[in-house]
Amino acid sequence: MELFTSLRPSERELAALLECARTLQRPTKVARPRFEALQKRAADADDVRDIIAACAPAEWDQHRPVVTVGHADQRAPRWTEDNRQEAPRDISIGRALRRLPDPASEEAAQRAHNLMEAYAATRLGVDDDTPAKPVQVDAVSVRPDSPTVYASGLDYDDAAKHPARGRCLVCNVEPSECDRRQRDGLCEDCRERGRPGLDVLPVNASRATRIRAVCAYRLAHAPHPLRALRAEWTRYTRDEDRRVIEDWVSRNVRTTRAVTLPAPRTAPERSRYQVRAAA
C-alpha cells in the first residue's frame, strides 16, 4: 500500500486509525466512497485491513458525523488588538456617515417652532377663513355650516346656481357664461338678431324672481301661452319651483270657465214590430 509503505507497523496502524477518524467526520455522501476506496488500497496489508474493517460503520444510513467540541478557550474569538480590524463585526458595507447637525439649522427650526407657538396662543379659537354666506332660497335661509344641512333636504348644488341659469328662451340653446351675465335669458345670436328677452334682472335676484319673469315672458311672447307655461312647469322638478309657477299662473292668467252643455236628447228605441204596426 502506497499510503503506509514507509512506516513501521505500529505507525501504520496509527496512521490508518487517523485516516479513518478523519473520514468518519465527513458527511455520509463523502465518507462512504472514501472509506470504500481506503479499503481497496489496504487490501494487501493485513494489519491495516483489519483496522479499517473494524472502523467501518455497519449501516451507513445511520452514520452521523461527530461534532468536535473543544475547550472554551479554543472556541473564543481569536481577535486581539493587533488584528481586531479584521473581525467580521467591525466590517460594514454602505454605512451612512453620521454628521452632526448644523447649529444654524437647529436655531432656524427653533425660531419657526416658537413662531408657530406664539401664533397659536394668540389665535386660539379663531378661524382665519371668512364665514360662509347663508344660502338664500326664497324665504329659506340656511347656513352651509349648519349641522342640519343634510337633514333639511335642501339641494345646495342646485341652490348655488346662478338665478338666470337656463337655456335660451328663443332657440333653447345653452348660453355661455358671458351671455348669462346679461341676465336677459338670451344667447348671443338671438340678442344680435334683436329677439325680445327678459327684463334685466337685478344682480341679487332670487330663483323665484327669475321663474316669475320667465312665466311673464312666455305669456307675452309665446304663440300658445298656456301650452308654454305648462311646458315650463314640467321642466322644473322641484316642488318649490312648480308652486311658484302655479301661484303666478293663478294670479296672472285668466281662465274661462268651461260651459256645461246639456246632454243630447235621444228618441226612445222602438222595435221593428212597432214600426210595422204604425205603418
Image (cartoon, rainbow, N blue to C red):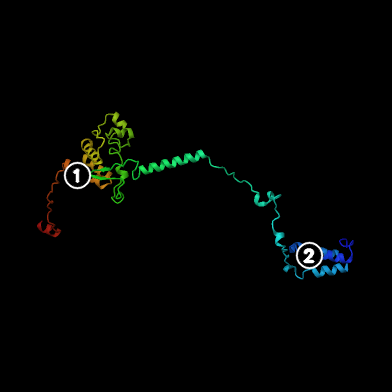
Dot 1: what SS?
Answer: helix
Question: Which residue is found at the position 87% from the left and 69% from the top?
Answer: 47
**Mark identifier at residue 168:** none
Question: Which residue is found at the position 72% from the left and 69% from the top?
Answer: 62
Question: Which residue is found at the position 65% from the left and 52% from the top?
Answer: 89
Q: Quadrant of the N terminus?
A: bottom right
Q: Mark 2 points at which residue?
A: 21
Residue type beneath disc 1: Asp
Q: In this view, does 250 lie to the left or right of 27?
A: left
Asked whether the beta carbons under mark 1 and mark 2 sit within 8 Å of each other, the answer is no
Give above or below for 60 relative to 165: below
- Mark 1 vs 2, N-terminal side: 2
Label 1: how many Cα within 10 Å (few below 14, some 14–19, many 20+) = few
Question: Residue 239 at what x, y percent from top left?
Answer: 25, 47
Give above or below for 144 relative to 54: above
Q: In which image quadrant can residue 132 be found?
A: top left
Question: Residue 166 at what x, y percent from top left?
Answer: 30, 39
Question: Residue 162 at what x, y percent from top left?
Answer: 30, 39
**Mark identifier at residue 247:** 1
Give above or below for 81 relative to 44: above
Question: Residue 100 at what x, y percent from top left?
Answer: 55, 42
Q: Quadrant of the C terminus?
A: bottom left
Residue 176 visible in rendering: no
Q: In which image quadrant can residue 202 be found?
A: top left
Residue type beneath disc 2: Ala
Please name whichever residue, 125 or 112, is drawn nearer the observer in this view of the structure: 112
Dot 2: what SS?
Answer: helix
Furthest-left residue in this view: 278
Q: How far apart are marks 1 and 2 (CA)?
A: 115 Å
